[in-house]
Amino acid sequence: MAQIDFTNATLDAYIGKPMTQGSYMKINSALYLYDTSGNNISASASRSIILNTPAKVSIQYTGTVNASGTEFLLGVSKTSNIIDFAWKVSNVSFSSGDAYDFIVDIETSGNS
């Protein structure tokens, strides 16, 4: 069991249709990691909001993976087994049993 290295990781939208406001917010309700077929590849998953201010929210995700790969999806929304929307984390490498611990920072602006 190794710790997944997120040093060079990227976070991008993985979209099957136009993005909506709800799509952006899926990252807040995300808990499990998925492969690009929409299969859950995480175990012992947890999510914690570690910072919540009007300007920034930081969400920490921890757990282990039960598959191998170089990318995963977070915040998956599916219709008829087709992924409509998710956030994709790429530029990582992991094997079954590896642990993950990463933080997603969301910066906000506007009226508070």
Image (tube, grey):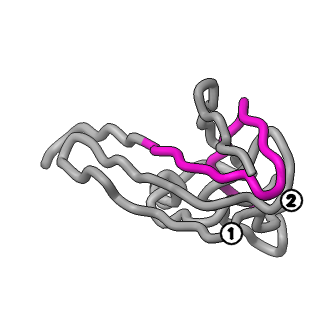
105 vs 30, left or right, is left
Circle 1: residue type:
Ala
Residue named by callout 2: 37
Point out residue 34 in the picture as x, y percentages from the top left corner.
Answer: 74, 59
Q: Residue furthest front?
A: 1
Helix, strand or loop at label 1? It is: strand
Q: Residue furthest bottom?
A: 80
Quarter occupied by residue 78: bottom right
Point out residue 40 in the picture as x, y percentages from the top left corner.
Answer: 76, 67
Q: Residue at x 80, y 55 (%)?
A: 35
Point out residue 37 in the picture as x, y percentages from the top left corner.
Answer: 86, 59
The question of residue 34 being in magenta is answered with: no
In this view, the residue in front, 71 or 17, is 71
What segment carries the magenta color? 83-104
Q: Residue at x 67, y 55 (%)?
A: 85
Mark 1 surroundings: few (<14), some (14-19) or many (≥20) residues within 10 A: some
